[in-house]
Image (cartoon, rainbow, N blue to C red):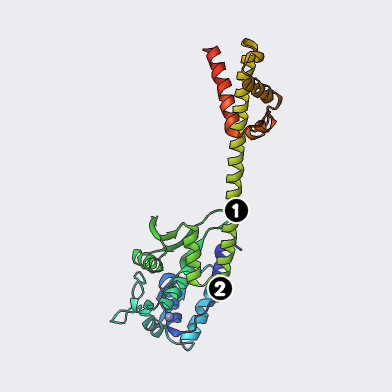
Amino acid sequence: MSFSSEVKEELERVIPDPRHCQLAELAAMICLGGRIGRGENGERKIELLSENSFVARKYFTLLKKTFIINVNADKVLQAIKVLDESGSPHQLSGEISPLLIRNSCCRRAFLRGAFLCVGSMSNPRKGYHLEFVCEYEAQARQIQQVICGFEIDAKIVRRKKYHVVYLKEGAGIVDLLNVMGAHVSLMLLENLRVEKEVRNSVNRKVNCEAANITKMVRAANKQIEDILLLQKNYGLSNLPDNLRQMAEIRLEHPESSLQELGKYLDPPVGKSGVNHRLRKLSEMAEGIKG
Ligand SMILES: [Zn+2]
């Protein structure tokens, strides 16, 4: 099952107790995933279209909880406020009544219903992307507004005839899953993020160490070249004692660090002392080259 479906399956099982929340979730589902039509006898009917069986199951559960089953469609539409004053249905193109999502608990339920109907999420192993694909701009705006109300950043983009509300940041997606009540998915996502973070930081460290080693090897090669040049054109025995000893030790230990070289000297000197002497040798070599 895709990660997206896992989230939806989890959200299907989240049934809010208060009726206000149930109505808010139902309203989101009918507005975003519903169609209003006429039955054979002219009565109004609502259809809910969904690719996932658990979305349909949730719709049924909410209907059963909020209304006595077999209630007519008009009454449902009235209750979730998608009928206008004349009693005719909206095109379901607009937003749901703000009265339904006055409470923060209801706004969470609204987002849950919206995600179940038009939401999806990428596999977090491949990247972070969560989106709501809406047919109408007003719907996208309302979803964006509610998400931003939880201090989570969401943007809207046009994709063909759709208005897509999307989140691209791992942290924002984790927050939104939390708001909707998808706590198991959230933990899964967090674990993946931590894993990725650790992997990145190990990689960074390895890269950094590799870069340092390369730098060290390059510097050592240059020092050895310079010393060999001095040996050939000047003679190491003609160098002052401290530099001669330094040159010999470097040639004996081409792979040692400056710190290690310092310990081989008699008397031992620190890293900066070694650095100073090697620089001096290189300057003399440059003088010969020049
Ligand atoms: Zn509520």
Q: At 35% from the left edge and 65% from the top edge, which residue is drawn?
A: 141
Q: For mark 2, does the 10 Å Cα neighbourhood hold few (<14), some (14 to 19), or many (20 or more) residues?
A: some
Q: Which residue is mark 2?
A: 54
Q: Which residue is mark 1?
A: 198
Q: For mark 1, does the 10 Å Cα neighbourhood hold few (<14), some (14 to 19), or many (20 or more) residues?
A: few
Q: At 37% from the left edge and 72% from the top edge, which residue is drawn?
A: 92
List x then y, in percent, for residue 64: 50, 85
Q: At 68% from the left edge and 25% from the top edge, which residue is drawn?
A: 249
Disc tally is 2
- Compared with 68, 185 (above or below) is above
Q: Nearer the viewer, residue 105 or 253?
A: 253
Quadrant hosting residue 2: bottom right
User: Identity of the amino acid at label 2?
Assistant: Phe
Q: Is residue 111 visible in the rendered structure shown here?
A: yes
Q: Nearer the viewer, mark 2 or mark 1?
A: 1
Q: Nearer the viewer, residue 143 or 229?
A: 229
Which quadrant of the figure contains the N terminus? bottom right
